[in-house]
Amino acid sequence: MIQIKDVSKLYKTEMIETIALSHVSFEIKKGEFVAIMGPSGSGKSTLMHILGALDQVTSGEYILDGEKVSKLSDDALADIRNRKIGFIFQAFNLLPRTTAIKNVMLPMVYAGIPENERIEKAKKYLTLVGLADRMYHTSNQLSGGQQQRVAIARGLVMNPAILLADEPTGNIASAQAAEVMELFQKINEEGHTIVMITHEPDIAEYTGRIITIKDGKLVGDKINKKQKKIEVKL
Amino acid sequence: MDIKELLIECFGTLTVNKMRTGLAVLGIVIGIGSVIALISLGQGSQKMIENQIQALGSNLLTVSPGGQQSGAVRGAQGGGTTLTLDDAKAIQTSSTITTVKSVSPEFSRRAQVVAGKNNTNTQLIGVYPAYAEIKKLTLSSGSFISVRDVETMNKVAVIGPQVATDLFGEGISPIGKMIRTSGQSLKVIGVTNSKGGSGFMNQDDMIFVPLSTAQKQLFGVSHVSSISIEAKSQDAMTEAQNQVGYLLLARHKFNDPTQADFSIMSQNDIMNTASQVTGTFTTLLGGIAAISLLVGGIGIMNIMLVTVTERTREIGLRKALGAKQKTIILQFLFEAIILTILGGIIGMFLGIGISLVLSNMMSIPFTISPSAIALAMGVSSVIGVLFGWYPAQKAAKLQPIEALRYE
């Protein structure tokens, strides 16, 4: 599903050259729920940007769902992001003053899906994340946890190859954070591949595999045998 | 993503940010509104002046004396004393003149006029009966100056409605009453109908007396200040102008027309000059309005640029969710175009409204020039594209990661 082969990333400014990632290789299979961990400055954000086709590798290869993502044009990358990747951001990044359903429909607008199908799918995924009664609330009328669930629905609606979550619980209260993680587990059980970036070990405990990055190098990759499970009460 | 989806998306963003949208539109509304209002006011006053000139009579030629020539120095136009009653009589009777219908020699001067306790300063004109016919003057009461009045130098006067009101008050018939001017008493024998209009050559504010009375008894002169000539038809104007010109050149003993001590202006000449003046005026007003249109356009660019900065995260998000560069450019461009077109339409109605109100207040004819509207709308769409393009480019080129990180 995801192949990262000997990937390096260099940032060049006028004065200095920073190595953000150095010869990182791993594979993620379909249906996995993976956490990528590491302290700040470790290069995990860079890795997330590369996985999300938001940034290009300096050397190495990135293959997503059989497609070579390295060395593509801006518009081709936009297309990959649209069809294959569902994003969930720390700051939710919903359109302000816009209803939940419209937010969820946005990726489908860019994909050119007809309106009646968009509405139908958006309703389906908003129901899945437990917001059937909040579809026409605008983003500022929702709590942090609810906003993140709208974002998850938006991430899932194109049925992407991977759901990429960047510190998804970083901006929400801990009780709601647990709910979001439960939701991730539920989605994962339905067969979706999830890659989550986090620096919180207890959040990483919800996943089935933990990859650790430090100083731009892969330092750990282990199966999480005692994956934390909570009764799903959604 | 097709155009319809894009437009729906644009309308969505614009309605979500009502304040921002309103401010941007306001700039264009004022720009377009002032262009349309000022141009139509300019054209309205142009039309009013044309109407006034037309009201003075049609197929009209006016002979004015040139300035007195002393050596190489030439005096001001119209200030001379070279035209006489005999010139007018010659035009009337000469066998070489075939295209002239009637001739009216005139002598006019401003004078203080007294009636009882009231007095006014007004234009006094010595005329022949032909004057009323040539200048399309009609009487509301009494009769006009007759040939007998001129021949016997009768001390009579026909007054305009404005003068009647000034001297005798509203609703009182001045017929048979006396007015005094330049040491003479004149008997009012008629009042003219109002011709409306104001300002230059207002025929409502004039006193008409027999030419002989004006020349000999009131002002003691022997020349005339102008000769009005009515040609037989519009087509005969040029011919009439030439015939009168040659006759007067011969009578005044000039060989070279450029040395002549008189000038002949046709109604058209006067109209063209006046139109030129008001045309320049309209252009000037349009220029001023164009500046406000430009300012409005820059306002839109300003708002769009601020919008790009304010919406950096949103643009980053849209790109992350699969928006292509072209889609972002089109979205911002369409937003700018919608703003300018919306502003253009509101501005058009505002401009028409303002010129309607102002032309009523200033009692000038209300004209709406389709070309002014077309110009304003054209310019506003061009502004929309032009000033929308740069912010749109800027937005489309944002890197999604940097845009997402932007605080």
Image: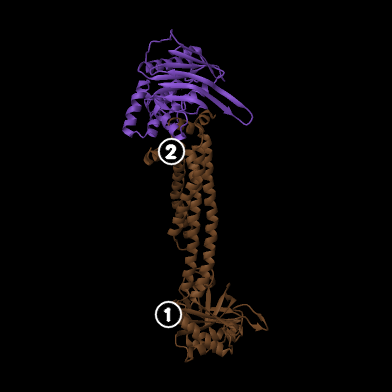
Chain colours: A purple, B brown
Image quadrant in which the N terminus of chain B is located? top left
- Residue type beneath disc 1: Asp
User: What amino acid is found at the position of numbered circle 2 in the picture?
Assistant: Thr
Mark seen at residue A27? none
Q: Quadrant of residue A111?
A: top left
Q: Answer above or below: position of A97 versus B279.
A: above
Going from N to C along the chain, the mark reached first, 2 or 1, is 1
- Vertical placement of residue A91 versus A206, above or below: below
Residue A96 visible to the viewer: no
Q: Quadrant of the C terminus of chain B?
A: top right
Instruction: Check the residue under mark 1 and report the chain it is in.
Output: B
Residue B305 at x, y percent in the picture = 53, 40
What residue did someone put label 2 on?
B327
Spot occupied by residue B346 in the image (x, y as percentages of width and height): 44, 49
Please provide percent x and percent y for residue B316.
48, 32
**B184 relative to A231 in the view: left or right:** right
Q: Chain of mark 2?
A: B
Q: Is residue B293 visible?
A: yes
Residue found farthest to the top: A226
Judging depth in this view, the residue of B162 and B233 nearest the camera is B233
User: Nearest the camera: B55 or A124?
Assistant: A124
Residue nearer the viewer, B401 or B205: B401
- The residue labelled by disc 1 is B235
Mark closer to the observer (2, 1): 2
Above or below, A17 against B1 in this view is above
With respect to residue B252, does B47 lie above or below?
above
Estimate how packed mark 2 is, as few (under 14), some (14 to 19) or many (20 or more) residues with alpha carbons within 10 Å: many
Q: Residues within 10 Å of mark 1 (few under 14, many from 20)?
A: few
Which element carries disc 1, helix, strand or loop?
Answer: loop
Q: CB under 8 Å between callouts 2 and 1?
A: no
Residue A77 image point, x, y percent:
44, 31
The alpha-carbon separation of the residues under discs 2 and 1 comes to: 65 Å
